[in-house]
Image (tube, helix red, strand yellow):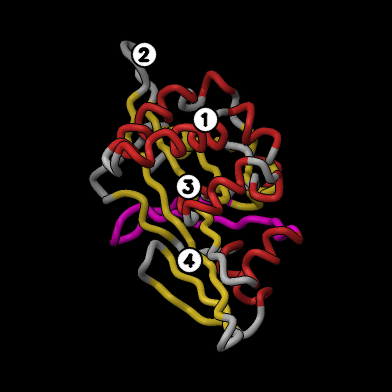
Amino acid sequence: MNLTQSALLPSRAHSLPGCAARLHAQLAALRRQGWQHWLLNLVLALLLTCPGTHAQAAEITVRQASIEASDEGYRLSVAYDFELNRGLEDALSRGVPLYFTTELQLTRRRWYWFDESSVSVSRTVRISYNVLTRQYHTAISGQLQQSFSNLEDAMTLIRRPPRWIIADNNTLKAGDSYNVGLRMRLDVAQLPKPFQVNALNNSDWRLSSDWIEFTYKPE
């Protein structure tokens, strides 16, 4: 399955995970960080995960997305189209790392009950700049790391990240149709705490794609 931009449609509110459900899962994880971070992260979660907020910040376009079966499992291939604004470029040049998180969910519809959530995963790509070496560094979920001499080359890895194993081969049922929800956003919650506070009042930091959805049927 290979989808072009014309086939990638912003998902409707009733067909995507609800804001309340996403907040419940996120806040459960945030509470484990300790009560001193809970209030700040609660505000961040409300601003960054609810539909009303990310709809206003939809400056990332999902150009292409496809899922394919392989010996290792089901792989996601995705491409984005966006530019960093001046505020984000300035922050990056001063040594502030930026985190871009892709979220993906697969659900299977059941006529007799609620939709079944089959896959819910995320992956973060980190980009940073070393002012001493004048090198840009990227890392995918803290593992795959690369260095670049200029920003444009480093952003290529953000816009066209390597294929990603999203599920084992036995996770999905052949012949069933799955609804796929996908988005990428600038993950402010992973910034150092002082920059999280600044990002709350700065529109430069609200960078996200819309949720897009498509159907995938494994063979």
Crowdedness of circle 3 by 10 Å Cα count: few (<14), some, many (20+)?
A: some
In terms of sequence position, does the residue under pointer 4 or pointer 1 come before the other?
A: 1
Q: Amino acid at mark 1?
A: Leu
Residue drawn 42% across and 29% down? 23
In terms of sequence position, does the residue under pointer 1 or pointer 2 come before the other?
A: 1
Does dot 1 land on a helix, a strand or a loop?
Answer: helix
Crowdedness of circle 1 by 10 Å Cα count: few (<14), some, many (20+)?
A: some
In the rendered image, the quadrant that contains the C terminus is top left
Q: Write the start and end of the magenta stretch as one range.
A: 65-85
Residue that carries the numbered disc 1 in the rendered image = 46
Residue at the right extreme? 86
Q: Nearer the viewer, mark 4 or mark 1?
A: 1
In terms of sequence position, does the residue under pointer 2 or pointer 3 come before the other?
A: 2
Q: Amino acid at mark 3?
A: Ala
Query: Label for residue 189?
Result: 3
Measured in 3D between alpha carbons, the distance from the residue under mark 4 to the one under mark 2, in whole angstroms, is 36 Å
Q: Can residue 132 be seen by looking at this rendering? A: yes
Residue that carries the numbered disc 2 in the rendered image = 111
Does dot 4 land on a helix, a strand or a loop?
Answer: loop
Picture quadrant of residue 26: top left
Question: Could you say which is closer to the camera, residue 12 or residue 93?
Answer: 93
